[in-house]
Image: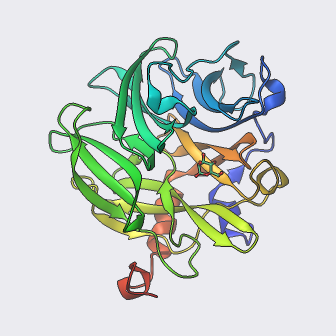
Amino acid sequence: MSDNPCATLFERHPQNPILTAAQWPYAVNTVFNPGATRLSDGTTLLLCRVEDRRGLSHLCAARSANGVDGWIIDAAPTLLPADDHPEEAWGIEDPRITYVAELEQHVIAYTAYSRAGPGVSLATTRDFVHFERHGSIMMPEDKDAALFPCRIDGHWALVHRPMSPLGAHIWMSYSPDLLHWGNHRLMLAARRGAWWDANKIGLSTPLIETPEGWLMIYHGVRQTAAGCVYRIGLALFDREAPERCLLRGDSWVFAPEATYEREGDVGNVVFPCGLTLGPDKDTIHLYYGAGDTCIGLAVASARALLGWLKTHRELPAWQATPGTNG
Ligand code: BMA
């Protein structure tokens, strides 16, 4: 076993990066930050953020039987910013996919980049060919959103990251109909000071349902004199009241180490937006943008992540709560 705790929890796939711009059937700048889902026939579908050579992003689907290679990439953009949606004027980015059994549809929460900044929009699809847009549900500046796969106490529930005078923290909001949102609750606050997740955090992938609660993979942004570093951490939330944090890890569990993560259009970034859970309900395939340039795959065990959380829980609240630790 390696001494590196990050390496033991998330194993990079030896074929990384598994998707790059060079594989795209049309001219693009970069491909990164994919949403992920496993279709009913077992196919892994990635909905990749593709940045074109104007700097604007759209989404493009790539399908693979094993989730590693043999990707079949749509010949043209799968979901482009819509002319009649001004909130998408500067592109659509960072999709998170949730399959909602009650709706028999996939719900995609994505960043709609408007002239007023990034907000959150929803679209639904059954086949990743035809999409229904539900428009803007969270005003700028807000991003890093994903829907829960089931109602919580009768309401739909969304995780998102508004920028507020309080800071860049992760919130939950509830809705009776996926259109009207309220009952906003702070879910996880960015730490302060020198911490790896100080000042700015955001949801990475949709939450993972486990017998012990909802497991969250989130990113923390450390600002340094040399620029930002995006790393990944873990937290666990109550099954019935998911805004209640049960456990939060102290250190990060995955960080830019490989050359393709350290270097790129935006170096020192690992940015997962999607994962698939294997038939064993334990094996996680985590799909992440690396350096805002290409797509990597890291494999983990949900049980091992929960075990790690129990032994690496955060320091007492007085050292970790915003406003009280300097
Ligand atoms: C975040 C998002 C991501 C991006 C990351 C690093 O704010 O915009 O899409 O990967 O910055 O540039």
Image quadrant holding the N terminus, namely: bottom right
Callout count: 0
**In the image as oriented, which residue stretches furthest toward the front?**
115
Residue occupying image coordinates x 64% and y 44%: 288
Q: Residue at x 74, y 44 (%)?
A: 13
x and y, in percent, of residue 32 in the image: 68, 39
User: Vertically, is 23 above or below 324?
Assistant: above
On the image, the x and y values in percent for residue 268 come to 74, 59
Nearest to the observer: residue 286 or residue 61: 61
In terms of depth relative to the viewer, which is nearer, 214 or 127? 127
Colour approach in the figure: rainbow
Q: Is residue 277 visible?
A: no
Q: Residue at x 24, y 54 (%)?
A: 184
Instruction: Please name the residue shown 76% across and 55% down the image.
Output: 267
Seen in the image, is 60 located left or right of residue 315? right
Of 175 and 287, nearer the camera is 175
Residue 183 lies, in percent from the top left, at 19, 51
